[in-house]
Image (tube, helix red, strand yellow):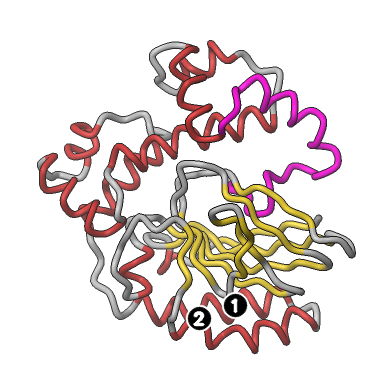
Amino acid sequence: MHHQEFQAPDALRDTIKCFWYNRRDFGNRQSSFEVLPDGYTEIIFYFGSGCSIAHHGSMQTLPSPFLMGLQNQPVLLATQGLFEVIGIRCFPWTVFDLLGLASGADGVRIMDHPVARLQSSLHDAIRAGRIAAAVNEVEQYFMQARTQIAPDSMLFKAGVAMRDANGSMPVSQVASAAHATVRTLERKFKQSSGYTVKDVSGLMRFEQVRNRLWTQPDCSLAELADELGYTDQSHLSREFKRYTGTTPAAFARKAKKEKNAAGNEIGAFIQA
């Protein structure tokens, strides 16, 4: 597996966290992999023999690109052979405005959108090994898209506060940081992302736990709970199981076994 991240330019940092490239060879047999929840929304371009998602007990083909929205449970994807991805990691309260789409809590969304026109030229660049050129093409597209939307200082300030606090800040404090009332912030946040401030904060905080357990599987859960503002270790464990279906201890054991084989990646769509 190879994973590479590219910092978003200054003009996009209020909407896009980063761009990234991932390459993995799954061999001749169809293989499945999980994508764990986190606090970002991803626009996914993929290149290879295809990509399917588990849906109501069967696998359904996903076109490229598709939108990987916020998830409350792991998503199971399947592919085979060489699988390459160009991803755009967006803040969930900005991505729908950036794309000019209605917000919603869709999870995975198939997009009928002009951005899909990039697929062919990106494919050619990827095949030629020109990864930086492919990323630059996507970056230029979104630089132009960014000029078409008005900045929302309230959502930007709220997002910065939530990220700085790793999702542990109460909604009232987020509203204060954004210089807004709780009611106004919640209304605008739901309109822009399809989710509440509390929903996204919970995913942000889970993301921190998940990443720490992956990189430091022997860390103390009690100390981690205290650091991230959970009531106690039991609270952390309940929230972790809600998002993954497994316990933090079981996840840490799995991390120990798989980390060497997978490098330091968490599934295919790692969040840094």
Question: Which region of the structure is painted magenta?
Answer: 245-272
Tell me the crowding category of disc 1: few under 14, some 14 to 19, or many 20 or more residues within 10 angstroms, Cα based: some
Q: What element carries label 1?
A: helix
Query: Which image quadrant for residue 156?
Result: bottom left
Would residue 170 be found to the left or right of residue 241 on screen? left
Magenta stretch contains residue 269: yes
Residue pictured at 16% horizontal, 51% vertical: 187
Q: Which of 9 and 75 is in front in this view?
A: 75
Above/below status of 183 relative to 151: above
Residue pictured at 48% horizontal, 71% vertical: 110
Would residue 38 be found to the left or right of residue 14 on screen? right
Residue pictured at 51% horizontal, 42% vertical: 73
Are the residues at dot 1 and dot 2 in contact (C-beta closer than 8 Å)? yes
Residue 87: give its label.
Answer: none
Residue pictured at 61% horizontal, 49% vertical: 35
Whole-percent x and y of residue 262? 80, 45
Residue highlighted by disc 1: 136
Whole-percent x and y of residue 243? 50, 35
Whole-percent x and y of residue 75? 57, 50
Above/below status of 130 relative to 260: below
Whole-percent x and y of residue 167? 39, 34
The kind of residue tagged 2 is Gln
The kind of residue tagged 1 is Asn
Magenta stretch contains residue 132: no
Q: In which quarter of the image is the N terminus?
A: bottom right
Query: Which image quadrant for residue 98?
Result: bottom left
Query: Which image quadrant for residue 178?
Result: top left
CA gap, disc 1 and disc 2: 6 Å
Residue highlighted by disc 2: 140
Q: Nearer the viewer, residue 57 or 65?
A: 57
Q: Is mark 2 on a helix, strand or loop?
A: helix
Tell me the crowding category of disc 2: few under 14, some 14 to 19, or many 20 or more residues within 10 angstroms, Cα based: few
